[in-house]
């Protein structure tokens, strides 16, 4: 499947800082993150519990899909999606090479 450059340009990729993390109340592999992507805090649900501790996530800058329609995952609303790379069993969060502020657009 391919998408046009027009379709791709509609995806709002932003740098976000993780403000808080808690365990998902209904899932063993999910975490609930509060992130700031420059337009206020949002809640994300992510399947990264087996790859990152909650402590190492707080303060980290990541890349998120900022305009994804909300979805309910195991009873908890997610208002976006973080981006990560999978290499075999490893999951690695996408981040920036240099320090940029929350809300910076990824192009």
Image (cartoon, rainbow, N blue to C red):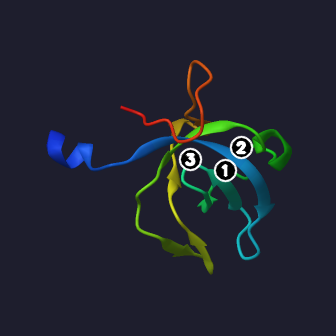
Q: How far is disc 1 from disc 2 in space, using C-alphas?
A: 5 Å
User: In the rendering, at what x and y percent does residue 77 appear?
Assistant: 58, 74
Residue 64 seen in the current view: yes
Q: Secondary structure at mark 3?
A: loop
User: In the rendering, at what x and y percent does residue 73 appear?
Assistant: 57, 73
What residue is disc 2 on? 51
Q: Residues within 10 Å of mark 1 (few under 14, many from 20)?
A: some
Task: Quadrant for residue 23, please give it.
Answer: bottom right
Q: Given contact means CB atoms under 8 Å apart, are the residues at marks 1 and 2 in contact? A: yes
Task: Give the residue displayed 41% in from the left and 57% down from the top.
Answer: 67
Q: Which mark is residue 48?
A: 1
Q: Secondary structure at mark 2?
A: loop
User: In the rendering, at what x and y percent does residue 17 appear?
Assistant: 66, 42
Task: Give the residue displayed 47% in from the left and 70% down from the top.
Answer: 70
Lower position in the chain sequence, tag 2 or tag 3: 3
Q: How far is disc 2 from disc 3 in space, using C-alphas?
A: 26 Å
Q: Residue furthest top?
A: 98
Task: Quadrant for residue 25, please give it.
Answer: bottom right
Q: Which mark is residue 89?
A: none
Lower position in the chain sequence, tag 3 or tag 1: 3
Task: Give the residue displayed 81% in from the left and 39% down from the top.
Answer: 56
51 vs 43, nearest the viewer: 43
Q: Secondary structure at mark 1?
A: loop
What residue is disc 3 on? 38
Depth check, mark 3 against mark 1: the one in front is 3
């Amino acid at each position: 499947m391919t998408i046009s450059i027009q379709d791709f340009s509609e995806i709002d990729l932003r740098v976000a800082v993780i403000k808080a993390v808690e365990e998902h109340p209904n899932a063993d592999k999910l975490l609930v993150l509060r992130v700031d992507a420059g337009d206020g805090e949002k809640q994300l649900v992510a399947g990264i519990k087996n790859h990152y501790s909650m402590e190492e996530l707080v303060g980290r800058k990541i890349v998120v899909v900022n305009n994804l329609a909300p979805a309910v995952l195991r009873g908890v609303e997610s208002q976006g999606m973080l981006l990560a790379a999978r290499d075999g069993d490893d999951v690695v969060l996408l981040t920036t090479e240099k320090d940029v502020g929350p809300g910076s657009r990824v192009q």
